[in-house]
Amino acid sequence: MKTVFLLFDSVNRLMLEPYGSDLLKTPNFKRLAERSVTFDTHYVGSMPCMPARRDMQTGRLSFLHRSWGPLEPFDNSFPEALKAAGAYSHLITDHYHYFEDGGATYHTRYNSFEYIRGQESDPWKVALEAPLDEIKAKYHPSQNDPNSKQNPYHHMINREFMTEEADFPSVKCIDAGFDFLDRNRNADNWLLQIETFDPHEPFFAPERLREMFKTDYDGPILDWPRYDRVTESQEEIDELRANYMALLTHCDQLLGRVLDYFDEHDMWKDTALILTTDHGFLLGEHDWWAKNRMPVYEEISHIPLFVHHPDHADKAGQRRKSLTQTIDLMPTFCEMHGAEIPAEVQGKSLLPLLEEDSTDREAILFGYWGGGVNLTDGRYTYFCYPEDMENQDLYQYTVMPTHMTKMFTVEELRTATLAAPFDFTKGVPLLRVAHRSKADTRTHSYHFPEKMVDTETALYDLETDPGQMTPISDPEVIDRLNAALFRLMAENDAPAEAVKRMEDSLLTRQAEPA
């Protein structure tokens, strides 16, 4: 088996033509849909970037036990499973979070990897004598917040070294992918993961594409929305959206190059091509930008998935309504390459769904660590949040105590006790570390519960209200979804305090008729 896994970051599904977009033309995503099975009810699991990748590699949810962090020693990993089965895996990525403290054990699971530098705040280029004030003046003041990142100016310096389209990290990722394929496409039993950070913010697209989406905005560079409420002028809103559309168009054209390569070398006959994203992105819907700070609306949680498999080429162009999730990728790759699916995996292989739809999955969970537990059955979405987000009984369970960009502090680790193993830790006890965000928020990964607002328990009917504008009250549905929620939490061996905060804060209050 030969597999190309193409992973983008922060794709808003509704901006793609195969998912009904009338705002943006994405001809190459449309081409891919014609060659693939398109999944219409595919959702995230753990959020955001690295928690999503932990789900992808391990085939199970992580957000009930842990925030952003590395793979743990007890975690299963699909590249390692493939390696044990004699398949070769190669990662090409410009996603710089793999190379921070909170992501440092993912890329090393592959047989080999290539890291393309320069995306976003990647600490790449150094220009100590550069006129920083002049460089900063090119950008909108909202992109000059010194508290926004550990070094908010890296992205500005990096961009000074990207003067041609060929300099863009995403372009280099695709080029490196072709180099791998030129050398290895005639071999057998390999998986190539080509992963680019685009269209993640900043929405830095080639100039020729930005010219396609001109707005009335007349000001400094504005292509990085704040993770906050929409408060910008209409011209600024239009500019931010236009830059996202330019960057997604860039991704569409990168995809087109991959499809052209498949056509040129007749790879459709013996090579699988799977494309998805880690999560979506709000572009002003619900009066919000981005993710992390607000409920996990459809624009964030409901993501695209396309699967071409040479053994199911007769299903090309078909669609599936089956409820699927990020954790399903791991067992799919294992089954495709003859690797054993570990007992701890809770995802389900997608291969049976290529033949026909299935209704054997009642519901799925998704969310952020400490940020609530959300559920969908494909018809309804159910946001379940504690009444008091700032005062929760929260603990991290880990033997890899790092946050996104730094180690756990000594103060955090002084709270640690040794917890008994969970059913997926293979007998390994874990550090149980108290959440101490109020004492030192900068030690954390910017995705913690006290940062979230407007998080109220709510039930939406996607059939009658796909935009999730009006919550409903339906006691029978609530009772059914509450039962599914606690069943799924039990199946994931959720910590006792996580279950209790749902029971105490949600079940009684939400079960009462409005």
Image (cartoon, grey):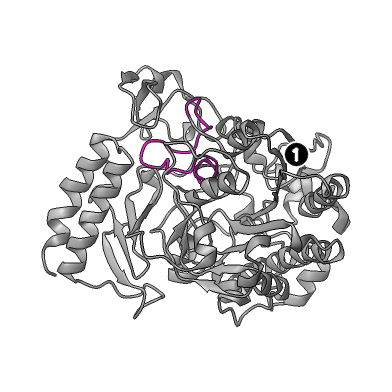
Q: Is residue 301 left or right of residue 449?
A: right
Q: Is residue 248 left or right of residue 458?
A: right
Q: Is residue 282 something that shows in the picture?
A: no
**Magenta: predominant secondary structure element?**
loop
| Residue located at (51% from left, 69% from top) | 284
Position of residue 490 measured from the top left corner of the image (x, y, whole percent): 26, 42
Position of residue 385 measured from the top left corner of the image (x, y, whole percent): 28, 53
| Residue located at (85% from left, 51% from top) | 167
What is the magenta range? 52-74
Position of residue 316 measured from the top left corner of the image (x, y, whole percent): 64, 72
Instruction: Tell me the crowding category of disc 1: few under 14, some 14 to 19, or many 20 or more residues within 10 angstroms, Cα based.
Output: some
| Residue 278 on the magenta span | no
Up-down: is 410 above or below 3? above
| Residue located at (34% from left, 55% from top) | 374
Q: Is residue 345 something that shows in the picture?
A: yes
Corner quadrant of residue 17: bottom right
| Residue located at (63% from left, 55% from top) | 200
Disc 1 marks a residue whose amino acid type is: Tyr
Check disc 1 and report its element: helix, strand or loop: strand
Position of residue 405 measured from the top left corner of the image (x, y, whole percent): 57, 33
Write down the residue under mark 1.
115
